[in-house]
Amino acid sequence: MEAAALRNSVPPQRAPLFFGFVGAVTAAAMTVCAVPLRDLPAQVPQLPAAFWMMALLAVVGDARPFTPPGSRRRSEVFPSVCFTFAIVLVWGLGPAVAVQAVAVAVFAWRAGHVPWRAVFNSSQYALALAAADAVAALAGPGAFAGGDGPRPRDVAVAVAAAAAWSAVNYTTVTLAIRLRSGGRWWRAARRGLGFELLSTGSLLLLGPVLAVAAQADPALIPLVLVPIYAVYRMAWLASEQERSARLDPLTGLANRKALITEIADQVPVHANALHRGAPDGRMALLLLDLDRFKRVNDALGHLVGDRLLVAVGARLAMVVRPQDLVVRLGGDEFAILATRVTGAAEARDLAEEVVTALAEPVALDGLPLDVGGSVGIALFPEHGEDFATLLQHADVAMYDAKDTGDGTAVYAAESDHNSPERLSLLADLRRVLDVNGAHAADPGGDADEVGEITMYYQPQIEIASGDVVGVEALLRWRHPRRGMVDPEELIKVAEQSAVMRLLTRRVVDDVVEQLAKWAATGIKVRAAVNVSVRDLHTGEIADQIADRLNRHNLPADRLQLEITEGALMADPRRVLATISRLDAIGVAIALDDFGTGYSSMQHLRRLPLSEVKVDRSFVLGMSADSDDAAIVQSVIELARALGLRVVAEGVEDEASWRRLHDLGCHVAQGWFFARPMPADDFISWLARYRPISPALSERPSEPPDPAEK
């Protein structure tokens, strides 16, 4: 046996211990074999033809040993084992050690091993054969050399000798691997134990059969090649089957199973490298998704799509380094496992090479096909220490790359909607919606554990008259442990799950109910509610709003929904269908954060919009930045030309208020008028508010902020 992990080189920091161990094994082998080898020259003339036949078969067999299947390299299986074990049973230790040394030398020469490695392999076999010879001696002299053949007790002793051979040999090699590569001894020992027992154990148990055959008739010895060949052939077929199971049948690249195995193999290797302080001790998983593959598949058919995938796989294989593994995970998704990288910068360089390679059209039947791709990167150990975690984080980074349009992205925890912290927050959000929804039936509930969701309202002021014409409903969640949860974070968490539907339903219920309460006291204002793209993909929200308005006998024009440009552009067809139903009900639609997205004039003309909201980022900078001022002016002029109401968000000073008036803006909201406040505080604020026009020199009367009391 030879340890495949035992390379021709040894890390300098481990060389003293390792070569000390090699020297000790060699010295021990020379000590126990000194006498048998000294007596060998006198024994050689007496050795029969059966011995020389076994010796020849041992040397020839080891010239081409069998390498077991699997990406994890185990030791080769050497046929010489059964012949030298039979020799030690019949003719003793000296001839067996000599034959084994010649077989090792032949293999070492063919494999290009350095001399110390051949010496160590010969020594380990010598010690194993010495252990087997010592156990075999218990059967008495001539047990396998006599003409009467072995007794049942002798067979049991032979099995024990084989066990002694395996124990000494396997322990010696495992310790050598441990001293060279590091890691836990038992982990290294048990990794290949099952295969070792099955393969080498089977060859060893052929030894007693060969010994008996040698005594009966030397002509029987070559017959043992038949079962050895059968074992070799079955092992080869198993190897081919396992190899096929680790390959993608379409592209010939490695598949998911191979990637899982390779990562499991590489993790301890890279962990040891990092422990030693190696600069290239990191590993990167690159996840690639083709950007326009579906269009090709739909337009030209699956056969062309398959050919495109094959071409992409070949192109990826040309880009990566020799030690990297290219994998097709399925569909149009590929992965690259880059080993021995120094960090994120090197991994990103490789990812950019991949993106650049895919930027070139793929020519199929003279037709250039543009696909392109986005690559997400996750690093070991920073972003994960196993396949599942690395793949999940690379997937998050890949969608980041798609969203930003950069082509590549390294995993960032803040972009991970599935991080433990966000998953915990999502679970709490679901609970708070359940608890608050059942609060009337069970006032105790679990509100103390998850907090309470409430609605705050920020007034919207008609600039020309100073009248309060509406409010924007804003979600607030005070968490008992996290404090006030950032609204943007809350929406990001909910938007990726079915909880968004529950949250929107809750907001619509609360706002419509509050509008009805205000209407009962004579307060008639319009309330604007923000909805996500997820809400607009079905008609459920239109049905809910119609039901709630009827239930509270509230005019539809009291409610307005705000959608962002991103939601509009995500799926214009489905969004248009939903907001058309809302428009038919009488609910107004406002385009929020206008100017930050990519809305086309065509969409502005086609959609039943009633209002455009200028994003606060432009309003805040308009007093000091001429570009922001020009954008605000353009938006106002465009909206007025289309007959739309214009609302400016983020009005925080008198100069902006007056400038918006001069530009013809209709409505404004911001801290200049009032901060968002609970419904009860809004009533108090409204009672104290005194309208005023920008044409006058005074600013609007602003009551104290309830939150600052």
Image: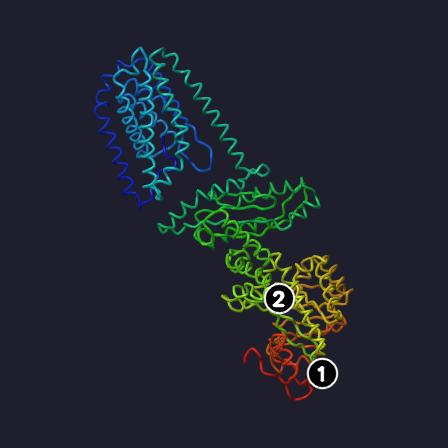
Q: Is 136 above or below relative to 407?
A: above
Residue at numbered disc 2: 440
Res 208 → quadrant: top left
Residue positioned 52% across, 58% down in the render = 424
Q: Is 147 above or below relative to 440?
A: above
Which quarter of the image is occupied by the C terminus? Answer: bottom right
Q: Which sits in the foreground, 123 or 586?
A: 586
Circle 1 packing at 10 Å, graded few (<14), some (14-19), many (20+), is: some
Residue positioned 28% across, 22% down in the render = 136
The kind of residue tagged 2 is: Ala
Q: Could you tell me how many numbered marks the image carries?
A: 2
Of all residues shown, which one is farthest toward the right? 584
Circle 2 packing at 10 Å, graded few (<14), some (14-19), many (20+), is: few
Q: In the picture provided, is 99 more to the left or to the right than 294?
A: left
Q: Which sits in the foreground, 64 or 114?
A: 64
Q: CA distance from mark 2 to mark 1?
A: 41 Å
Residue 86 in the image: state x and y as whole percent: 33, 20
Residue 233 in the image: state x and y as whole percent: 48, 24
Disc number for residue 443: none
Disc number for residue 465: 1
Q: In the picture provided, is 570 more to the left or to the right than 35?
A: right
Element marked by disc 2: loop
Q: Earlier in the sequence, mark 2 or mark 1?
A: 2
The kind of residue tagged 1 is: Ser
Front disc: 2 or 1? 2
Which quarter of the image is occupied by the N terminus? Answer: top left
Residue positioned 71% across, 69% down in the render = 560
Residue 132 in the image: state x and y as whole percent: 29, 25
Q: Is 668 above or below relative to 135?
A: below
Element marked by disc 1: loop
Residue 236 in the image: state x and y as whole percent: 48, 28
